[in-house]
Amino acid sequence: MDETTFRILDTLTREIGRPLSILELTSKIKELHETAYYANTYRQLRNMAAHGLISLTKAGKSAIASLNPTSYLLIDLLTEIELTRKRKLLQERPELNLIFADLDKQCKDLDFIKSISMIRPEKNFKLNRIELLIILRNHDFSNIAKIHEILRGIQRRYNIRIDYLPLQTAELLRMLGSDEDNPLKEMLADKICLLSAQSFWGDILDSMREGLRIRSEEKEIYPSKIGEQSLTYNLARFGYREFGPEIRQSRDICKELLAASLLISDDARRIEAIPIILAKGKTNWHLLIFLTEKYGLSGRLFGLLKALYHYKPTKDLEEAIKLLELTDVKETKADMRSIGEKLRLYDAIR
């Protein structure tokens, strides 16, 4: 693969679902790779479109470039993109070689793992941490426990922190296609697939062919920086309407990100809203635990989940508590009586 093709595909995969004119694409390539020339980009795009790898569609006077998920060859090229990203990272960060080799050795024969991706590799490694997205064939507790044991061992051997998010393919695709802001869209914009890139991109391209609209998000959303207007609006969306504040339209954020934002605050009233929003509708416990581990909030979450389980025990919640117990988290006790009263007040329990 020539360098211009690599840069085009590298950029389009990071900007997937966001329409880019050739001028905008050239600008993004320059931002990522330091140099880019409109004429070279235009010429190579025309060539790639002729071979069916990308689509060029008219939008006024501009041409919009996007990946063509129906291309048979595209999955191989995207796999090659991931391998090239991985090689470049290891050339720049040779100390990662031993960690990657250890991870690959211990995980490659685990048939319940479909793929493993490293998220925001440069940024996280500078903080002496690794963030992994692990796509699984199933969510059996024994499989998660096995992954946890492997990663804890790697953490000890190389003195580096590892946060990981285990998801099934359907969960990944659901969040990538959701209208809500969520961490998976951010992950897609800056990741390197370390294991089974062909499987990872195969699932995404298959879903795109079936009509799923996937959109990555370049900007990371920090739970601590979610504004008051967004908090009150999204709390109301999930069934917790506060007395007093005016609710104004804001961007939808996923329940798990909302809960992490509330946990960061020191507002006891808001923190006690978390069991209410978790009790209503479906919660992705793996994503919630990942976020609370990442931001050092697991102790608070542990206490809240135990209180919620006391009033509304479910199998999924029981497993979430077991997953937190794997991390040896120290529980921050929640006010059991107050939470019970609020759960009844908001009709979250009978």
Image (cartoon, rainbow, N blue to C red):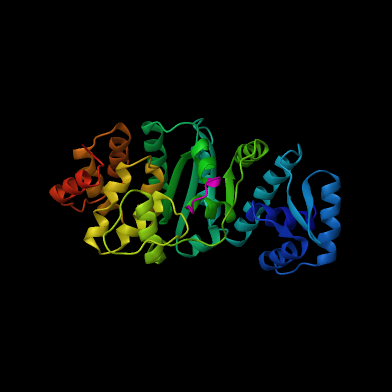
Does the rendering let one see residue 156? no
- The quarter of the rendered structure image containing the C terminus is top left
In this image, 197 relative to 127: left or right? right
In this image, 151 relative to 11: left or right? left
Write down the region rendered in magenta. Answer: 176-182
Q: Where is residue 224 in the image (x, y as percent from the top left)?
A: 38, 64
The residue at the point 30 percent across, 42 percent down is 279
The residue at the point 29 percent across, 51 percent down is 274
In this image, 288 relative to 111: left or right? left
Q: Position of residue 287 (x, y in %)?
A: 41, 46
Pick the front one: 130 or 106: 130
- Where on the picture, by quarter, is residue 160? bottom left
Check the image and report above or below for 349 versus 237. Answer: above
- Where on the picture, by quarter, is residue 121? bottom right
Q: Where is residue 129 in the image (x, y as percent from the top left)?
A: 45, 58
Q: Position of residue 114 (x, y in %)?
A: 54, 36
